[in-house]
Amino acid sequence: MDNLISLVNKIQRACTALGDHGEASALPTLWDSLPSIAVVGGQSSGKSSVLESIVGKDFLPRGSGIVTRRPLVLQLHKIDEGSREYAEFLHLPRKRFTDFVAVRKEIQDETDRETGRSKQISSVPIHLSIYSPNVVNLTLIDLPGLTKVAVEGQPESIVQEIETMVRSFIEKPNCIILAISPANQDLATSDAIKISREVDPTGERTLGVLTKIDLMDKGTDAVDMLEGKAYRLKFPWVGVVNRSQADINKNVDMIAARRREREYFANTPEYKHLARRMGSEHLAKVLSKHLETVIKSKIPGIQNLINKTISELESELSRLGRPVANDAGGKLYMIMEICRAFDQNFKEHLDGVRPGGDKIYNVFDDQLPAALKRLQFDRQLSMENVKKLITEADGYQPHLIAPEQGYRRLIESTLVTIRGPAESCVDAVHAILKDLVHKAMGETLELKQYPGLRVELGNAAIESLERMREQSKKASLLLVDMESSYLTVDFFRKLPQDIEKGGNPTHSIFDRYNDSYLRRVGTTVLSYVHMVCATLRNSIPKSIVYCQVREAKRSLLDHFFTDLGKLEQKRLSSLLNEDPAIMERRTALAKRLELYRSAQAEIDAVAWSK
């Protein structure tokens, strides 16, 4: 299933282009979930020669000491026979290299661009793709060689830094470890085996390669190592014979080197029985087949990660909101849509869909009655005040039957105190409506995206509520004043009958100001005021709902919408200004989402075709 490895290569390249790869990330990424092969070995163990043998090209930097100072992610793509070989670097898109000497130089230059011309290392990978009819589809990650001693120009920490970098790759459960060990060295001291054993103690993920078999001392061989007797792995060891330094200096052709390698294993008595599974060509096929097998086994987990990540990306994109339109019409439409979303949230609070609207009812049912009950009428209806107002109302000519003008003045002076609770009731509802505006703004996610619009919308809503409060206050106070301006006649027509029943309908002109008489006047006025309070307890809430609550539902943003239509594009744009970091984040998330959806479709297609 070469197409499966090609698909993984394609997804890995896309992940890398978007920075969605886990170079030591704590969070799992699509890159982490895709199996790849990390090449591990000590310095001068022959790692570079093995890679060049697999590729069939000289393309890696050479030299003494630490040469590989950055991870090299090498993707091999098999193309049709007869096609020309070429290479591409991710950092140089659309530039093809057909000269592999230039490839080597670019690896060196790109390393120096990241680390400077020092011997420092960097965990930032170089990504190289090679297209050739002479390779198998494969992804290999060449890592800096492990070392025990820092060389001149390197800090002492370099030893630990390299090991930490290598571990960051091979500790991932989806990483296949290609452990390179020289045959002329005791496996017990092999850097590759030591670190592989620590991260993969069962050997489930490790493939062992022995290099420099042809350089072993006479009388010794690597048969025990190749047969797994010296150190057993789950998979058979593969031996390779790399080109000698003399061959490299003479630019010996890779095809010729592969032929000589085959001949070495076929003609050497110790290795003849193992020849069919020795050599760099066999190694490349083994790696490709093993990679395919691992990818197949990981497909369900990859699908789960992709589906979960798509859901998370969609959720975050939704939270960040839509990108801003370019034209004035689009901007105006977008602002209107956001305002409507806010207005709907506000209405839902009033209608009980969201919490908070019930507080208005509590004002009418608890606060207003309690405020009316707390009104103190003692001062207005004290004996002295009743006598004073009645006397003043009589003027020079005392009243004959009932002090009508006195009653009116007493009632008016008492009812005026109800204006306070009426105004307080209006203000209490106004405060609740303001609070609901702020809540609705907080619940409108788009307003978090555009702070300029949030401020303007909030100011416009509060201004509308202020206008409605003034209207409501006028209407409520008008109800109180109406009660003062026209008294209910039926209430007073009953009074003579009540007095008649008391057996003392008239009073002498001389005793009209006695305590009993004044007390009766005060009691009558208080009864009338209580009757008015009962009426206002019902009519004031109606007035407030009509002037404030219903009006806020109906026309909270009317003035704002009218003003919006008059704004120029520049002003509209300023309302939709957002944090540049959010814009960049949205763009990055959209690209990443596109990658994951594409990967989802392609991996699902492969999974269904199995």
Image (cartoon, rainbow, N blue to C red):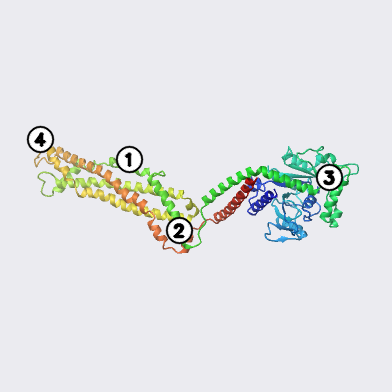
Spatial separation of the CA atoms under disc 1 and disc 2: 43 Å
Circle 4 packing at 10 Å, graded few (<14), some (14-19), many (20+), is few
Where residue 277 appears, as percent x and y from the top left, is: 80, 44
Q: In this view, does 353 lie to the left or right of 206?
A: left
Residues at marks 3 and 2 touching, judged by CB atoms closer than 8 Å: no
Circle 2 packing at 10 Å, graded few (<14), some (14-19), many (20+), is few
Name the N-terminal-most of marks 4 and 3.
3
Front-lying residue, 603 or 366? 603
Spatial separation of the CA atoms under disc 4 and disc 3: 137 Å
Which mark is drawn over residue 503?
4
Residue found 32% across the figure and 53% down from its top: 470
Q: Can residue 225 be seen in this view?
A: yes
Spatial separation of the CA atoms under disc 3 and disc 2: 74 Å
Amino acid type of the residue that numbered disc 1 sits on in the rendered structure: Asp
Name the N-terminal-most of marks 1 and 2.
2
Q: Considering the numbered disc 4 on the image, is that residue within a helix, a strand or a loop?
A: loop
Amino acid type of the residue that numbered disc 4 sits on in the rendered structure: Gly
Instruction: Please tell me whether mark 3 or mark 2 is closer to you in this view.
Output: 3
Spatial separation of the CA atoms under disc 4 and disc 1: 42 Å
Disc 1 target residue: 366
Say if 608 sits above or below 105 in the image: above
Disc 2 target residue: 333
Amino acid type of the residue that numbered disc 3 sits on in the rendered structure: Ala
Disc 3 target residue: 275
Q: In this view, does 475 lie to the left or right of 592?
A: left
